[in-house]
Image (cartoon, rainbow, N blue to C red):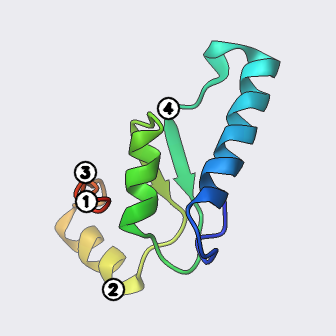
Amino acid sequence: MSDEATPHYSSLIDQMTLGLKYLNDTFGECGQPRVAWQIDPFGHSAEVALEFADMGFDGVFFGRIDHEDIALRKKNKTMEMVWRPDDTLGN
């Protein structure tokens, strides 16, 4: 995963292009992931989720979540969610 603290989205695109090319060269089309993993310890940006969606990913697993948010989700039994990135971010 690219560093979300980089000043430009091109770093994410460059890293994803290189990684997906490696997977395709090594495993063929069947090696293309459908779900992304966002491990960033500093939060999850809507922009990265939108970029993952634009790259064809069907979902995202989060590596970290706010302790109050996770406690509330456990209490309400709502650990799974559908996060629809705002497709107007680029407009």
Instruction: Give how far across and how far down residue 81 sits, in percent.
Output: 26, 54
Amino acid type indicated by mark 3 = Val
Mark 4, other Cα within 10 Å: few <14 / some 14–19 / many ≥20: few
- Which of the 4 image quarters holds residue 18? top right
Amino acid type indicated by mark 1 = Asn
Q: Earlier in the sequence, mark 4 or mark 3?
A: 4
Q: How much space separates mark 4 and mark 2, taking CA atoms?
A: 29 Å
Q: Between label 1 and label 4, give the one nearer the viewer.
A: 1
Q: How much space separates mark 4 and mark 3, taking CA atoms?
A: 15 Å
Q: Between label 1 and label 3, give the one nearer the viewer.
A: 1
Residue 43 is marked as: none
65 relative to 48, above or below? below
The residue identified by callout 2 is: 68
Q: Earlier in the sequence, mark 2 or mark 1?
A: 2
Which quadrant of the figure contains the N terminus? bottom right
Q: How many marks?
A: 4
Question: Is label 1 in a helix, a strand or a loop?
Answer: loop
12 relative to 70, above or below? above
Mark 1, other Cα within 10 Å: few <14 / some 14–19 / many ≥20: few
Q: Earlier in the sequence, mark 3 or mark 2?
A: 2
Q: Are marks 2 and 1 in contact (CB under 8 Å)?
A: no
Residue at (41, 81) in percent of width and height:
66
The answer to whether 64 appears left or right of 17 in the picture is left
The residue identified by callout 3 is: 82
Mark 3, other Cα within 10 Å: few <14 / some 14–19 / many ≥20: few
The residue identified by callout 4 is: 34
Residue at (39, 43) in percent of width and height:
53
Amino acid type indicated by mark 2 = Glu
- Which of the 4 image quarters holds residue 86? bottom left
Instruction: Give how far across and how far down residue 14 sits, in percent.
Output: 68, 49
The residue identified by callout 1 is: 91
Amino acid type indicated by mark 4 = Arg
